Amino acid sequence: MRIGTWNLDAQWSKEHQTLLAREGCDVWLLTEVNPKARDTNATIAGYHAHFSTGVMARGQHWAAVLSQLPLTPLPDPHEASAAALVNRVTYCSTILPWAGCTTPPPTPWVGSSLEEMARPAIDRLKKVLPKSNTVWGGDWNQNLAGGWQHVGSAAMRKVVESAISLLELRVATAELPFQTGANQNTIDHIAVPLQWKIGSTFRISAVGLSDHDAYIIEVDGT
């Protein structure tokens, strides 16, 4: 199956719809989703869709889960997350805090460091997401490949990695490049159960549509 993640940067157009439909993912884990993306059938690009209740400063939903198969919406694990059950697997899309996000509400972050802001959200996710039966992704604002941190921090990375280990997942996207290149690795990720076989992983250019590219993985979860 194909699983994708993409931060839409609160934008929406026919070109966004075309990219989502063209790539043929079974599930999309979207972030910063413009409510205009939802059509009259409450779908996005033909996908069943579930949005986070929480919205960001520009009115965009923090996250959404899209599925070709019917999905069962789940309560938001955290304000900046959306979750749904698809074929007995929990899919969760999340935004984590980033450098400079210490602005007033509607941001849900509390604390003086990225680690402090991320920890309550990640602690909540660890409590509600099923171990070894979750696909967790989204815009984590965190480079997981090491090296220079653009919007994350080394301390926050440890918190994220601890959650991945506890949930018995592995990240398939860590080595993929960010849109800007310049030796930067992506901050958008997809993590799948350890027992799933990961095949191809690749980036889809979204220059002109978003400040993030889309990322897709092919997995065997049988």
Image: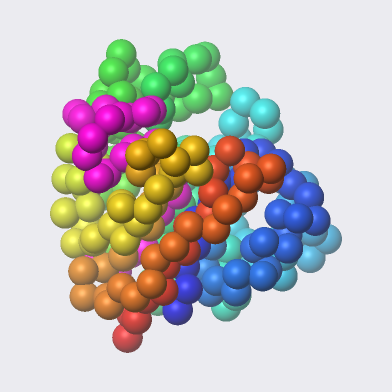
Residue at 39% x, 66% y is: 201
Image quarter hosting the N terminus: bottom left
Res 207 visible: yes
Residue 43 shows up from this direction: no
Q: Which residues are magenta?
A: 132-157
Q: Position of residue 5 (x, y in %)?
A: 49, 56
Q: Is residue 169 above or below residue 89?
A: above
> At 50% from the left edge and 25% from the top edge, which residue is drawn?
107
- Location of the C terminus (image quadrant): bottom left
Q: Residue furthest bottom?
A: 222
Mainly helix, strand or loop, the magenta region?
loop
Q: Residue 221: within the magenta?
A: no
Residue drawn at the location 44% of the way across and 41% of the way down: 181
Query: Which quadrant of the figure has residue 124?
Result: top left
Q: From this viewpoint, which residue is outermost toward the right?
A: 40
Look at the picture and state if 129 lies above or below 114.
Answer: below
Q: Is residue 39 left or right of residue 196?
A: right
**Which residue is drawn at the image coordinates 21% and 69% (left, top)?**
194
Quadrant position of residue 100: top left
- Residue 58 on image: x %, y %: 67, 28
Indicate the position of residue 113 as horizontal and vertical percent values. Answer: 28, 18
* Residue 155 versus residue 80 in the image, above or below: above
Which percent across, then down, holds residue 119?
26, 32
Numbered-mark total: 0
> Which sits in the foreground, 4 or 102?
4
In the rendered image, which quarter is residue 211 located in?
top right
Is residue 112 placed above or below 175 in the rendered structure?
Answer: above
Q: Along the horizontal axis of the image, is 174 left or right of 201?
A: left
Give whichever of 194, 48 is nearer the camera. Answer: 194
Position of residue 159 in the picture relative to residue 75 (left or right):
left
Identify the coloring.
rainbow
